[in-house]
Image (tube, helix red, strand yellow):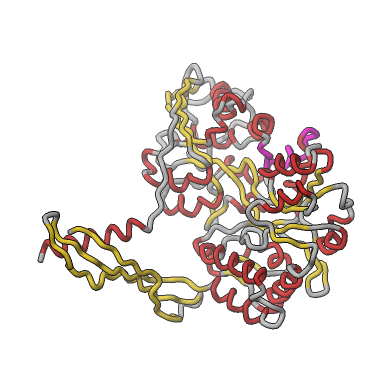
């Protein structure tokens, strides 16, 4: 009997483990000794004064000898792209001659911070790069420090309110932004004029436009443009997603008619870039990562880049809006040297460091003064991203409830494309979408049923088991809607 119970426990653990997604550890550790003599900053993580320039040396700090581990993407450490991280850490050390600092470098892409850092926060880097939508998980794991004092002041003074909001969670600012993440419009200047690209409808009269309607990171543009909101626009989990009423229905109807337009095509699996190349598409929507592909397709001299256009929804011109996020630098609260770590994070997000990041890797800064720098302001790509962040975007929420958004919005886009959503049923389908957005599973019951021995051999007993996960599903007002089986698996195992 004990053997049977043990077996069932192991099987249940195996099923639960199979549903989890893991991530590899950071690698390629490199060490470089920076400053020549050492000293510790005199303030805590919430009050530290960050160096704003690598040349602004500080000689009145208490002496300390510290080893600081920093994690970033490999590209920020690569010699062929200027070794931005190592260069900046050396400049930081030179700015603090009373600190004796040794830096250790590890590789961790920004989007994987929540996975790698939370595996063991006490053993993770003192300072690390992160995508802003990682912050909620990092806070929950007690793996990121809330900023305060001059570090907080610098974040607020250097960045727009939207960018500050991307690193704000439950009222606290948790990271130092250094670049934004959003999408905008590329177009063929031989087909569209600067006036044409202000209006999507005018563009559709003159040329072919490809838009990723089946991608939920993009199709929010029409709903947000017409007044729909996601978590109040400021990560307010209690506000939920508001795709209710006529504002959302009107956006759905616009999209139903959009897909019928002969000059419109859905951009999926790279079809938009391919269309630019063969002339069947004249405008696409993407981000900085696609510039080289667009330039190759059109020729750099023919590439136009602008913020999002307007669309005429329900008889009025509304501004389409993209999701916007940021990449930032965070500090591990488990660091032994919080003063040094916060000062370093602030420096890596300083105007000097952001300018160098732009020079070495073309990383477009968030710092407001740099966006007005003649060198950067003359860059059409940087200007388009800056204008989009400032004028035609909303913050991409990163509260837990966003997990209900992605697949539901994607499925809505696909249903519109397939013709399953029509003008006639738009209200019904949009209301169902809003309900799905605001429905969540509060509790799952995992049960093992029908676990039967049906074969015995020299290798032992062979079992066939049925695993079922039943969920109690609630709406946003916490009224139970239904119970349903959401997962079933039949597994054959040796016992």
- In percent of width and height, residue 479 lies at 46, 80
134 left or right of 427 in image: left
Q: Quadrant of residue 321?
A: bottom right
Q: What residue lies at 40% left-to-right and 79% top-to-bottom?
A: 483
Percent x, y for residue 439? 50, 73
Residue 172, position as x, y percentages in the image = 54, 53
**Residue 29 placement: quadrant:** top left
- Give whichever of 45, 76 is nearer the camera: 76
Q: Is residue 153 or residue 232 the one in the foreground?
A: 232
* Residue 333, placed above or below residue 218: above
Residue at 67% from the left image edge and 68% from the top image edge: 417
Quick check: 234 left or right of 141?
A: right
Give the residue displayed 31% in from the left and 60% down from the top: 15
Q: Residue furthest top?
A: 36
Q: Position of residue 273 (x, y in %)?
A: 71, 49
Quarter of the picture holding the N terminus: bottom left
Q: Left or right: where does residue 80 sit relative to residue 308?
A: left
Q: Is residue 240 above or below residue 212?
A: below
- Read off the magenta span: 363-375
Residue closer to the observer: 252 or 434: 252
Total labels: the figure holds 0
Residue 43 against residue 96 in the figure, above or below: below
Residue 215 part of the magenta segment: no
Q: Is residue 100 visible?
A: yes
Q: Quadrant of the C terminus?
A: bottom left
């Amino acid at each position: 009997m004990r053997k049977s119970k043990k077996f069932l426990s192991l099987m249940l653990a195996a099923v639960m483990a199979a549903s989890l997604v893991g991530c590899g550890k950071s690698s390629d550790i490199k060490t470089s000794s920076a400053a020549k003599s050492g000293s510790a900053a005199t303030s805590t993580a919430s009050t530290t004064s960050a160096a704003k320039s690598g040349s602004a040396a500080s000689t009145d700090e208490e002496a300390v000898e510290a080893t600081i581990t920093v994690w970033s993407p490999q590209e920020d450490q690569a010699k062929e792209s200027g070794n931005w991280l190592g260069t900046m850490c050396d400049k930081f050390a030179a700015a603090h001659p009373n600190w004796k600092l040794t830096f250790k470098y590890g590789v961790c892409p920004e989007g994987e911070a929540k996975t790698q850092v939370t595996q063991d926060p006490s053993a993770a880097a003192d300072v690390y790069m992160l995508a802003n939508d990682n912050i909620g998980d990092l806070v929950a794991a007690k793996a990121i420090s809330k900023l305060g004092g001059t570090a907080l002041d610098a974040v607020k003074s250097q960045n727009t309110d939207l960018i500050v909001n991307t690193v704000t969670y439950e009222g606290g600012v948790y990271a130092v932004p250094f670049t934004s993440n959003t999408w905008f419009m590329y177009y063929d200047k031989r087909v569209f004029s600067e006036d044409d690209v202000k209006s999507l409808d005018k563009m559709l009269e003159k040329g072919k436009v490809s838009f990723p309607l089946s991608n939920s990171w993009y199709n929010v543009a029409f709903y947000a443009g017409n007044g729909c909101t996601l978590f109040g626009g400021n990560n307010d989990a209690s506000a939920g997603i508001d795709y209710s009423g006529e504002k959302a229905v009107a956006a759905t109807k616009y999209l139903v008619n959009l897909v019928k337009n002969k000059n419109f095509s859905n951009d999926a699996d790279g079809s938009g870039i391919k269309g630019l190349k063969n002339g069947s598409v004249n405008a696409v929507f993407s981000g900085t990562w696609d510039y080289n592909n667009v330039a190759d397709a059109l020729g750099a001299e023919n590439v136009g880049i602008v913020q999002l256009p307007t669309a005429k929804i329900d008889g009025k011109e509304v501004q389409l809006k993209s999701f916007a996020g940021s990449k930032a630098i965070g500090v591990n609260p488990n660091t032994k040297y919080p003063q040094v770590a916060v000062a370093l994070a602030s420096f890596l997000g300083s105007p000097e460091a952001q300018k160098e990041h732009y020079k070495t890797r073309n990383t477009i800064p968030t710092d407001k003064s740099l966006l007005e720098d003649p060198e950067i302001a003359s860059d059409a790509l940087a200007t388009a991203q800056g204008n989009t962040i400032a004028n035609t975007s909303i913050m991409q929420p990163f509260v837990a409830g966003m997990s209900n958004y992605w697949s539901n919005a994607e499925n809505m886009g696909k249903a519109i494309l397939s013709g399953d959503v029509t003008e006639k049923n738009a209200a019904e389908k949009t209301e169902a979408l809003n309900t799905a957005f605001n429905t969540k599973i509060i509790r799952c019951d995992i049960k093992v049923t029908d676990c039967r021995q049906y074969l015995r051999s020299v290798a032992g007993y062979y079992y066939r088991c049925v695993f079922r996960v039943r969920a109690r599903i609630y709406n946003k007002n916490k009224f139970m809607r239904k119970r349903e089986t959401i997962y079933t698996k039949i597994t054959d195992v040796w016992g």
